[in-house]
Amino acid sequence: MSPSAQFLSASEAATRLGVSVKALRLHEQRGLIAPARTSAGWRAYGPNEMARVAEIAALRELGLSLSQVGRVLGGDSESLEPALAAHQAALEISVHQLVDTVDKVRRLRADITGGRALAASELARLLRLASKFSVAFDLPWPWGGERFELRDIRSLNYIIGPLGSGETRLAKCIAENVPGAAFLGLDRLSHGGAAANPLLHCDPALKSRVDQTLAWLIEDGATASDALTGLLAGLETEGPAVLVIDMLEQGLDKATQEALIAWLRRRDSKRRPLFFLTRSSSILDLDAVGDDESIILCPANHSPPTNVRPYPGFPGFEAVATCLASPEVRARIASRPQVA
């Protein structure tokens, strides 16, 4: 076909639609879209493909797996009912929270009218726009006791750094200092599958949640494994206000990692924040990081950890990209001669 002004390249279409190029390829692999091809063989996305991807994105926002999306687009509207019910419940929770906030504002106004002085802390709590949690603590070795402050904790928080940069120590410090936080270590890998995992054996409700999530992930391309079951048991355990996870991708293949991060992004936004160490470009896809996600880099020179935005040119971006490279590429970069 001849390129036309109404057809866009993959990168142009992804930018216009607010999705990643990787997502477009995944949709194509699943048979959900079929972009045209230019005479040179490049994918080209026209109005029909763009509308289709927008529909897919809307359905994914409702929490549907790609298999469920395919069924809905194929005419099976019954697959929408559970997702719409969950979405309705989330909206009702938001409405109740908004009503509660309005009541608090009304009471504060009445107090001011009645002559009571308004404490600054009351106003700060009411108007706080950052995070549910904010904490500061002294960093251990190798940082030498420097003060570290978490001000803007997002729904998903990636912790990344080269080997020896202290990222595991930072993760454990977060788990120890954030109120209500828990650390999910690599010992989860030794718990075995659903039949052997002690958490699942003692808690039928937890097992039901894990089974449901596992089915969702498998529909989205994940491979069932003991490593995935152990991780889901930790993720679905109720109680901790914040969960810190050591090497989220450990024991999971690429397709499972992609399905997992897609599921984590579609959790109810009111659920607890997650911190996790990673060096996987499938988990931390710099093209797909959203507004409710943050990247914390532990620099190789043991400077204090810093927040990095997923944009080329932003301080720390290249260091994060290097950590996400394959082991072979990282070794080649590390051995690169230094310019005098």
Image (cartoon, rainbow, N blue to C red):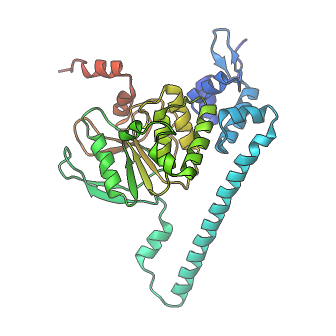
Image quadrant holding the N terminus, namely top right
Q: Quadrant of residue 91?
A: bottom right
The answer to whether residue 191 is left or right of residue 23 is left
Q: Which residue lies at the image location 58% right of the left edge and 38% below the top edge?
A: 214
Depth check: give the residue in front, 218 or 42: 218
Can you say whether 216 is above or below 30 in the image? Answer: below
Q: Which residue lies at the image location 75% right of the left edge and 33% below the top edge?
A: 71
Residue 150 image position (x, y, % from top left):
36, 54
- Report if residue 57 is visible in the image: yes
Q: Which residue lies at the image location 64% right of the left edge and 32% below the top edge?
A: 219
Can you say whether 280 is above or below 275 in the image? Answer: above
Depth check: give the residue in front, 158 or 176: 176
Residue 108 image position (x, y, % from top left):
53, 80
The answer to whether residue 246 is left or right of residue 260 is left
Furthest toward the top, the residue is: 39
Q: How many marks?
A: 0
- Report if residue 285 is visible in the image: no
Q: Quadrant of residue 16?
A: top right
The answer to whether residue 277 is left or right of residue 208 is left
Image quadrant holding the C terminus, namely top left
Residue 4 image position (x, y, % from top left):
71, 19
Furthest toward the right, the residue is: 75
Q: Which residue lies at the image location 19% right of the left edge and 46% below the top edge?
A: 141
Can you say whether 193 is above or below 103 in the image? Answer: above
Residue 37 image position (x, y, % from top left):
68, 14
The answer to whether residue 228 is left or right of residue 313 is right
Depth check: give the residue in front, 166 or 3: 166
